[in-house]
Structures are given as C-alpha cells and as structure tokens.
Amino acid sequence: LRAQAGSTAQATAEWIAEEINQHPPATVIAGHADDKTSGERVIQILGGGRVIASLPADAPALTSAEGQVGQVSASTIPRIDGVDGDSFALAVTAARTVEGQIVTVAVATPSTLEESTQIALLTLATLTGVGLLALVAVGVRYAVAAALRPVEEMRAQAHSITDIGVGRRLPVPAGDDEFSRLATTLNDLLDRLQRSDSARRAFVSDAGHELRSPLASARVALDRLRDEALPEDERVAALARARLALDRLGYVVDDLLVLSRMDERTAVTPETEIDLDDVVLRAVRALPTTDERITLALEPARVVADPKLWDRLVRNLLDNADRHAHSHIRVTLRREAAGAVLEVDNDGPPVPEAERVRIFERFVRLDAARARDAGGSGLGLAIVAAVAERAGGRASAGETPEGWCRFRIEVPVAPG
C-alpha cells in the first residue's frame, strides 16, 4: 500500500509539473478540483516560501524544501492538519511556469486504509479464519476417526474374546503400518496365551489323572482289608499295595509342589554358592545300588543355586538312570569354558531322537508301565529341566559314543 501510494504521488507530481509548463498554476489546480480522486490527496504549488495554489485550498504547506526540475524526491509525512489520515507519501519536484518562474510541486497521497476499509478487511479476515479453523477441525476429526477405526475394530473384537482357548484373533488392517503391527503383536500374544492355557489345562488334567490312580489303588487295597476272612498273606500284600499307592501319591504331590514353586519363582531355600561335586557325591551314596555298578569322575565346580532343588535334580537323574540301566551307570562332572557340565549315562537304550525334547515335558513317560511300577510320576525330568533353566543352564538328552543313554546338564559356574 505504501509503495502504491508513493508511485501515485510521484506520477501526479510529474503530471502537474508538465501542466504548469503550459498553464498558470491556478488554472492547473482548478482543473484537478473536479477529479474524482482529488479528495484522496493534497496537491500544492509553492514558490518563494508560500503556497501559490493548493487543493484543498486551506491545506498547510506540505514542505519547505525546493524541488528540482526533472527530479522527483519521495518521502513520508505522518499527518496533515485538516486532512484525514495518519500517513502520507510525499512527492516533490519543480516546474517552470509559462512566465519562466520556477515553482515547487508537492503531492501527498494517503498510504493508510480508511477505517471502513480496515473494518471490512478485519471482518473478512476473521470470518475467513474462523471458517478455515472450522473446516480444519472437521477435516482433522474425520481423518482421526478414519485412522482410529481399525483400533476400534480391534478393541471390539478383543472385548468379544472371553475364552483365549477358542482360537479367535483380531483383524489385521491392510498395509504395513503401526496398526497392522499392533494387531499382529496382539495376535502373537493371544497365541502365546492360548498355548499357555492349553498347557495349564493339560497339566491340571494330567495331575488329576496321576492323583486319581494311586487313590484308586489305595481304596481297593483298603476295601480288601475290610474282609475279616482274608488270609494273612493276602492281607500283608494288600497293605503293601496300599503303602505303595500312598508313596506314589506322595511323590506326585511333592513334585507338583516343587514345580508350582518354580513356576511362581519362589525359592525352596535361599540361593547360595554350592559345591556341585559334593551334591553329586551325596546323591550317589544315597542311591540304593552297589558301588560296582557306578563309575564316578568328578571335578570341583561351584554354582549359585538353590541347594535343595539341585539335590533333587541330581537325585532325579540318578533315579532315572538306575531305573533304566542294565548293569552300569556313569556320572561325570567337569569344568568347561562355558561352565560346569554334569553327564549321567546308563547302559540302557537311549531316548529316541524324536522324543529328546518332549521327554522334559510334564507327565511324559516313554515307558509308562515300568515308570508307574517304580513310583515314577512323569515329573522328574520336568523338574530337572526347570531347575537347570532357573540357574541359567539347560538340560538335554542324547546318546554316548558307545550307544548308552545320556542326560546332560550345562550350568554357569559361580564367579571367581
């Protein structure tokens, strides 16, 4: 607006100067009195320090400087007495009259908007801004609602899943973005929960079966003992069967309690540094078998672990080896770069390769009849694997070079 006002003032000043070369100053000013735009600017012809002609007539002198013929100087003035406006672009030049006199031509053009125009522009800008904000708000709301629609669908689907065992899953939105990755992650979580739930249900079912069998055996034996006419030898046999059933029931309950504590990360006793070779030696001496049947090769090894759990681990491995060995058991404990390695071998048949991972699951017995007769619950090797994993190690089943059955435990040794 200022640039346009300055250009208008300079053009008008040059125009007035050309007219003064041909007409008297008063005639020139009178000719512009009827101009429709004359009310928007001030035109003056000055000479000798006084106003010769002015439009409007009562306007004070715009400048005291003398102009130069053929040159236009531009400046601004804040206000002019008696004229509306608070800023004007001023152009000053000089012209030669028909009489040969040099006069100064000054033209002032307003460079601010009128109040009505300002109000109109402010109103327009306000309404436009409000309209744009409303349009943006509606657009953002629609865009956010459209973007979050897959989340709402996943929420509704997740709310409708009341049983993780039914196999229902959340819908995965098309594309590869945060929503599709979230749905995939939640479905993976549901898969893990379903597997965990299936394992829990199988565990409860198997535990119920294992507890029901010895209870049934004990009940049958006790029913026979109620018969007063039962011969003494049969009475003794019934008592032995009842004791065997109750012992087996005790084994199952003890093993279930141990697994429950480990599932809850609850220690049987506080973890401390233990001499694993001493634990193995005590377990071997407590084994009900002849010394000639066992070969020992033990190196000192200290581990940080629960003493009672590791005593149970070693006893479970030795009981398993004694149950399946034909004539010989070999126990080896040595130090390796990765830690301590405990190997319990027996000259019985090795675990089939396809079963060497499943053998450490709960209630798994590859020879169910023999395990039950000997009091096995199918939990011994599951406890071995859980105790080794708790200490940062691992349990595995394999085969020795000569074809024997081998169970191997790897565990980190105590620092220092």
Image (spheres, helix red, strand yellow):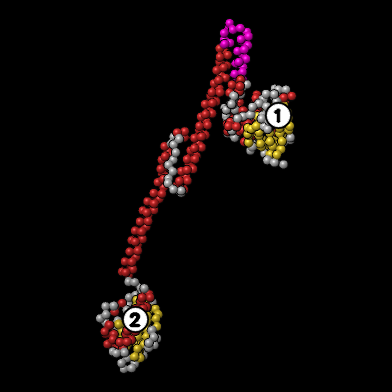
Residue 194 appears at what percent x and percent y? 49, 35
- Residue visible at 34% across and 84% down in the picture: 14
Q: Nearer the viewer, mark 1 or mark 2?
A: 1
Figure label count:
2
- Residue visible at 40% across and 80% down in the picture: 75
Magenta stretch secondary structure, dominant = helix
Q: On the image, numbered disc 2 is attached to which residue?
A: 11
Q: Residue furthest left?
A: 34
Could you tell whether 334 is left or right of 58 in the image? right
- Based on the displayed image, in which of its 4 quarters is residue 376 positioned? top right
Q: Residue furthest bottom?
A: 99
38 or 287, which lies in front?
Answer: 287
Q: Residue 240 lies in magenta, yes or no?
A: yes
Label 1 element class: strand
- Residue visible at 44% across and 36% down in the picture: 168
- Disc 1 residue type? Arg
191 or 139, which lies in front?
Answer: 191
Give residue 86's mark.
none
Could you tell whether 42 is left or right of 261 in the image? left
Residue 159 appears at what percent x and percent y? 42, 38
Q: Is residue 387 visible?
A: no
Label 2 element class: helix
Numbered range of the magenta stretch:
224-248
- Disc 2 residue type? Ala
Could you tell whether 278 is left or right of 111 in the image? right
Q: On the image, numbered disc 1 is attached to which residue?
A: 330
Does 128 appear above or below 98? above
Residue 305 appears at what percent x and percent y? 66, 35
The earlier-in-sequence mark between 1 and 2 is 2
